[in-house]
Image (cartoon, grey):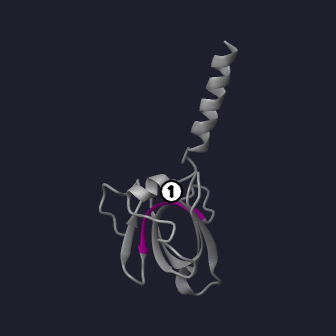
Amino acid sequence: MLALSAAGVLAHSALAHHSFAAYDANRTRTLEGTVRTYQWSNPHVVLRMLVSPGGQRAPQEWRIETSSPAILRRFGWTRNSVKPGDRVSALCYPLSDGSHGGRLQTLVLLGSNQTLRTKLSAAAPAQPR
């Protein structure tokens, strides 16, 4: 009985960690900016980018989360796909609380016009333009 209880707690913790309930899946937002950091690590690859809303205010740092490196590799990503300083356009589900973050769907490298898709967008031809 104790083993089953422990397994239930561990399973719940794993599911809670991978929940994307913090993101508003009913709307998307396109962000254009410059990559500050690109963290290729588990459990999720994280892109931090500087975005100037309206081009007039000081840049805001946005934290954009996506799938694990193993999943992104299946869609053609590598640890060198994105580099600090790259100009990008990111289509994402924004955080529900309005803070500067999102769950990435599609990333376009503006210098080469290369489109990188995630598991979320692989079946849909979404373009963040």
Residue 129 seen from this side: no
Vertical comparison of 105 with 25: above or below: below
Query: For the residue labelled by badge 1, is the local secondary structure a helix, a strand or a loop?
Result: helix
In the rendered image, residue 79, in percent from the top left (x then y), is placed at 51, 66
Is 46 within the magenta?
A: no
* 89 sits left or right of 52 in the view: left
Give whichever of 70, 129 is nearer the camera.
Answer: 70
Vertical comparison of 86 with 76: above or below: below
Q: Quadrant of residue 118?
A: bottom left
In the rendered image, residue 31, in percent from the top left (x then y), is placed at 49, 73
* 93 sits left or right of 17 in the view: left
In the rendered image, residue 106, in percent from the top left (x then y), is placed at 41, 65
Quadrant in which the C terminus appears: bottom left
Give whichever of 87, 30 is nearer the camera.
Answer: 87
Kindly give the residue lying farthest to the bottom in the view shown: 56
Q: Which residues are magenta?
A: 101-108
Residue at figure coordinates x 38%, y 82% from the top left? 112
Mark 1: few/some/many CA within 10 Å (<14, 14-19, 20+): some
Residue at figure coordinates x 29%, y 62% from the top left? 125
Residue 33 seen from this side: yes
* 71 sits left or right of 95 in the view: left
Residue at figure coordinates x 52%, y 53% from the top left? 68
Quadrant in which the N terminus appears: top right
Vertical comparison of 58 with 89: above or below: below
Amino acid beneath label 1 = Pro
Residue underneath mark 1: 69
Kindly give the residue lying farthest to the right in the view shown: 2
Kindly give the residue lying farthest to the top in the view shown: 1
